[in-house]
Image: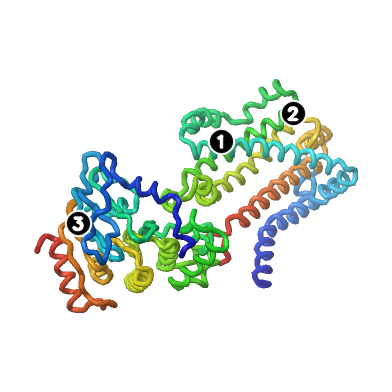
Amino acid sequence: MSVIALHPNREQERNRIDAPGTERAAPLPQASPAVPLAFSLSGIGKRFGDKTVLDGIDLDVPEGQFVAVIGKSGCGKSTLLRILAGLDKPTSGTFTIPAGSTPDRRSRIMFQEPRLLPWERIGRNVEVGLTGIAKGEVARDLSLKILDEVGLADRAEEWPSVLSGGQKQRVALARALVAHPFVLALDEPLGALDALTRIEMQQLLERIWQQQNFTAVLVTHDVAEAVALADRVVVIDEGRIALDLPIPLARPRRHGSPDTARLEGQILDRLFGRG
Amino acid sequence: MVMTATSTIARNLAGWLLPAALILAWEAASRTGLISDGVMAPPSAVLAAFLRLFASGELVENIGISTLRALTGFAIGGSIGFAFGLANGLSRLSRDLTDTTLQMVRNIPHLALIPLVILWFGIDEEAKLFLVALGVFFPIYVNTLLGIQGVDPQLLEMGRIYGMSKRQLFFRVILPGALPAIFVGLRYALGIMWLTLIVAETIAASSGLGYMAMQAREFLLIDVVILSILIYALLGKLADSFARLLERLTLQWHPAFQPA
């Protein structure tokens, strides 16, 4: 993927995500020499006016990890994700992306809505993910390749309006992944899908994540989904991390196995303050 | 494809059934004396007038003059309206500076300016162009502005996240998003264009379709009067069909324009 390895705005992006008035930390000492950190949050706080949404979040995520962030509505999980994706700045604390082995550390975000351009065909919509990175023939090839990954290669010439909700979300996933991001932030991307399509999408997401080795941060309010997909589940409550639970289950995981049920119970207990 | 083509033609023809039936009934009523010749000329007489004026070249000349006036006025007023719509949709400063003024002027019926316009321009071409341009300006302006303001902010955010430049954002997100509303303005403006021109030509002109109708009235040529009215109707329909064709070509992505 040498074509897309260069990103002219890399430095700007890295500067933009630092909170005003905080110094950028030097690359952190790595927790384990084998797996370097993808990013590190330290003391991240976010206020909107008087309202404190995030209050001192510390989180180190190793490269390639799949983290699920769970919390009740309004707990600040989406704000955390927007900070990760560079859409919002934290009011306090530091967000560090250590300079690592990978030269390009682009991050992408995927929303609950597909946000496809209705007036551009599917293929062109995926090419939006290559804006400023590749164009023309190269962009077309890359987008066809990724559309093939999500099983929609034959729909490249269609309008978004003819696709189902799940298919649109697969196009959005293809658009987010076409430039091979280092971090993929997912803001309840499966929230609006029906139960069966959801499970299909979860399997697709897991397969592509395993192939591409990006770091994934999934915000969800579906505990079963978090346990099915993530290496680690972080529960956020009132702007703080209330639980940080590793999910050491082998993949592919089966919905409804005793192990997943036990972990789901543990998370639900913490969410509702029963643990 | 053949099936869809024939069914499209059939659907288009269906719209002409009612006018055709009305014309037949009208002719019958005239022949039987139900409608007196002093009130309405029968369609056959209107047709005869059409052939007579067509042969003399008078009709073609007047239609040409009126169409040229309509389109020139439309081009002037429409492009200024579009420019203001874009500027005020994209720039807050521009909107703050000009929108209030434009909204005030919009509330003056532009035909109320006819006496003033005659004082300024006499009954020359400028008078008609000015009125048409003014009439066309507002629907285009208002709908362009509305279209741009109505562009989905989630799509704009998406475009920015993916690093689109301002130019890319405009051509790939804002303009296509505003296009359906712009077309509403366009079709509305085409209606106003003919309306304004008819009034202006009827009141103050020395050529054109409206002038032709007024001359005919002086000489009690009721067939020519009715012919002018019918031609106005046809020209209006033609303009609307053209706008719809443009709409179909540029809004292919829109579910409303896709073959079922």
Mark 1 Cα-neighbour bin, 10 Å: few <14, some 14–19, many ≥20: many
Identify the subunit bearing mark 2. B
**Separation (CA) of disc 1 from disc 2:** 30 Å
Q: In the rendering, at what x and y percent does residue A265 appear?
A: 15, 69
Which residue is painted at 11% across and 60% down in the image? A273
Identify the subunit bearing mark 1. B
Which residue is painted at 37% across and 61% down in the image? A102
Amino acid at the residue labelled 2 = Ala
Instruction: Check the image and name the residue furthest to the top.
Output: B119
Secondary structure found at label 1: helix
**Separation (CA) of disc 2 from disc 3:** 75 Å
Amino acid at the residue labelled 3 = Ile
Q: Which mark is residue B84?
A: 1
B14 shown above or below B218: below
Q: In the rendering, at what x and y percent does residue A38 appear?
A: 30, 59
Residue A129 seen: yes
Pointers 2 and 3 in contact (CB under 8 A)? no
Q: Is residue A94 left or right of residue B112?
A: left
Secondary structure found at label 3: strand
Secondary structure found at label 2: loop
Mark 3 Cα-neighbour bin, 10 Å: few <14, some 14–19, many ≥20: many
Q: Quadrant of residue B228?
A: top right
Amino acid at the residue labelled 1 = Phe
Q: In the rendering, at what x and y percent does residue A111 appear?
A: 36, 58
Which residue, given by chain and number where applicable, does mark 2 sit on? B204
